[in-house]
Image: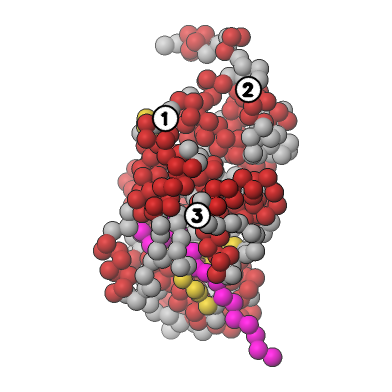
Amino acid sequence: MSEEKPRYLLFLGCVIPYRLSSYEISARKVLAKLGVELVEMPEYNCCGFPMDPVNHDVMLTLAARNLCVAERENLNILTLCNGCFGTLCKVNKTLKEDKEERERINKYLAEFGMEFKGTIEVKHLVYVLSEDVGFEKIKDAVKKPLTSLRVAQHTGCHIVRPKKLIEKDDPENLRLLKELIELTGAKCLDYMDEAECCGNPIIGVNESIPFQMAKEKLEHIRAVGAQALITVCPFCHMMFDMNQPRIERAFNEKFGLPVLHYPQLLGLAMGFTPEELALNELRVKPFDLLNEIQSGRE
Amino acid sequence: MSETQEQVLNIIKAEEMDPKFKYEISKIHGAEKIMLCYQCGTCTADCPVSRFSNFYRPRKIARMIQLGLKDRILSDKDLWLCTTCYTCIDHCPQNVDIAHVVRVLRNLSVKHTNSMPLVFKELANNLMKTGFVYVIPESRHTRRAQIGLPPLPKTKPQEIAKLFEITGFAKLLENVETFGRVE
């Protein structure tokens, strides 16, 4: 019996190609090895999320345009970004279920010769790994378990909230990313307020509040003794990695906490080298972490 | 200014109140249940932004709508402090989609005050130019090729411009005023 290989249209969004190739590189490596086939989107635009605050219809139409491209290709979408997932998933659901909204947005889409039909699904990396690849297969792919590591996770908001729209993991008791982390052999530590937002979405209008939010999370993570933080969203990653030195300066603190994209952690456990997973591109250098992994294996 | 004086300035005058405002709002997708808010304050208690802001209070926003304080709420820049984490939506016992209500108010505020935070105008302009909200420099494309990543998919900026036009957003964007930081 031949098993069908999962195929997805890869929706990269804006911020990953702009700033976080490390996430794309590591995700592509890991997914290929796990037998997930990625098809490049023939054309796309911003998911729409950044425009929602100023114009809801622009957001809906931008998102629907992307969904129509996927419908034309007859393939489900895989996103790496929480924001892209939340937007495309919710708009897909709204337009499938709400006839009035669908007709209204289809009038806009008709200008581009497009029509939303509602024939595809949208999934985030976390859901493709847990639902389609499956824990067993990931476990089998782990060749060099990271048993000496203790890490923490930051799932982020838009792949779990609002719960009634996403209907996946429980945002009050996050489970999926923790389980995916433990498959690598690393221990995933619980910490206080772990489901809270990183603060990044408002950084364009106010820096002080997101910095305080992220600093508090970093303190809680440090308190349980985590050696790294694992994220699955480019915006959360930027908040904790790229902005970490600035947060340290603003509060006269020293965290030095490496922040890895989940596929980087999984990739290390699967036997890829740090170079292959673009770990050198992280702002907070994970030297101690890599030494720890090395000595844990010796 | 003493605290007492400040409170005097904040007194609500009857003529400020637009009794129809709550009906207007509750007709908009996402804000249908605003009248069900009974001011329990769960949204504010569980809001991570409210913990660090002296001003942003979702409960107060809901009450201002119910009272019909249209001008006040639509010109309140604190509206821009919601991170859309949706914790308030998940925790509201009355199922008021409070983060969506804030989005509805932000959209209306842009039209009502003819202004928006600068960052959104910049993102929108990039979108019209490139199809992405950032201008991805040529060096990024070259680097992708060097490290063996496939080229980025094509975008159709002319269609984005068209989309902005048919939704009425282009016209708004042309003359909109901007402001920088919200503290």
Total marks drawn? Answer: 3
Mark 1 vs mark 3: tell me if same chain. no
Residue topped by disc 1: B115
> Eyeballing the image, is B69 above or below A42?
above
Indicate which disc residue A274 carries.
none
Residue topped by disc 2: B21
Where are the magenta residues, as a range?
A1-19
Say which amino acid is labelled 1: Ser
> Eyeballing the image, is A104 above or below B6?
below
Q: CA distance from mark 3 to mark 2?
A: 36 Å
User: Dot 2: what SS?
Assistant: helix
Indicate which disc residue A112 carries.
3
Q: Quadrant of residue A76?
A: bottom right
> Eyeballing the image, is B25 above or below A131?
above
User: Dot 1: what SS?
Assistant: strand
Question: Is the Cβ of the residue at disc 3 closer than 8 Å to that at disc 2?
Answer: no
Give the residue displayed 64% in from the left and 48% down from the top.
A103
Let me know if residue B27 appears in the view.
yes
